Amino acid sequence: MTAQRIWFAVLALAAVSVGCTAIAPPGPQASMPTIGSSIRPEPVIEPDLPPSPPVVMRADLAAHQRVMRADGSEFTMRYSSAVFDPRWLDLQFSAGWEHEEQANVDSEALLFFTGPTYERQPGRNELGIALHGDLLLGNGEWRAGNNAAAAQRAYLAITSAGELEFGYGRLLHEQRHHYRIFIGGLHALINTTQAAPETYKGVYSRLSLADVRIIYAGRADGQLELIETADGLHVDDLRAFAAQQGYVAVYLPDHASKSRFIVPGIKLWSEQQALWVSGGDLSITPLPFMLKAQPTSAWFSAPP
């Protein structure tokens, strides 16, 4: 058993026993010194890097909150939560139809989750899809195939300085050096940082179904919280939850039947989960890609 597999086994036991855990990948192992050399090595000049955080992701996979609606009634919201410091978060495009089984055992990942919507266009590319939003990620850039959708929706971004931003529209050429991560094609539930422009066309004013949801939430402390609801919820209940939590912004990819929230080795994708999020119709659950969360290379280079 490799060191990483042992690490995941320990985390799995911790998650089962307490329901909440702080997750950080193992850093690179130090090399063994050369034996028998009499030459004194030159002193190593350490790079001037900020100290790395003790954890990259804090996860609570059995979270629950009592939430009060505007009419005074209450409900219990059950959900899985992963909180990231955006300064140390890298996101990768993980391509492949129905590759959840590989994601379940990926020892490099912290989390796999649902990205923006798409439409099928056979023959357009290897996946046969057109994205509804631009993506700028750690392993490349993907331009939207539906330009109208990309321009009319919202985005989440991480700047080169590691700050979280929630905005509207598509990725502009002059923004490529400003942003390290850009996820377009999203739907704004709330955004207290800036008003939506007239060009924004969201869908949540007309949604009425109670579905399992993936939530991208900007916290008041500058952290990014990713959430999967355990049960189907109406949009108004999500707004009540967001207001109670004090989020500065909440965006959704609007993949109700395709929600993914996989913590490798701990919270796994299964046929039972597929049946739950799809309402029993497995034909609508296949997904051509997910977003893969992992630490930045700078996290591994920073001193402990």
Image (tube, helix red, strand yellow):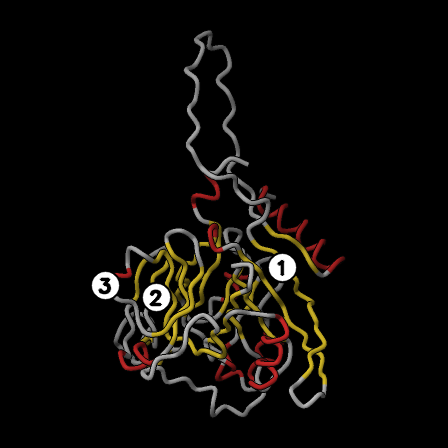
In the rendered structure, the answer to whether residue 215 lies left or right of residue 125 reads right
Residue at position x 43%, y 14% in the image: 41
> Residue 11, how many percent across, how many down?
66, 52
Residue ID for mark 1: 59
Looking at the image, which residue is at 52% across and 42% down? 52
Tell me how far mark 2 sits from mark 3, CA to CA: 13 Å
| Comparing labels 3 and 1, the label whose residue is closer to the camera | 3
**Circle 1 SS class:** strand
Q: Which amino acid does label 3 sit on?
A: His
Amino acid identity at mark 2? Leu
Q: Is residue 121 left or right of residue 27?
A: left
**Would residue 35 appear left or right of 78 to someone viewing this image?**
left
**Residue underneath mark 2:** 135
Which percent across, then down, holds residue 26?
56, 43
Residue 230 vs residue 216, the one in the foreground = 216
Quadrant occupied by the N terminus: top right
Of residue 91 and residue 51, the one placed in the foreground of this image is: 51
- The answer to whether residue 279 is seen in the rendering is no
Q: Label 3 vs label 1: CA separation?
A: 35 Å
Mark 3–mark 1 CB contact (< 8 Å): no
The answer to which image quadrant residue 126 occupies is: bottom left
The single residue placed furthest to the right in the displayed view is: 17
Quadrant in which residue 122 is drawn: bottom left
Q: Mark 3 points at which residue?
A: 173
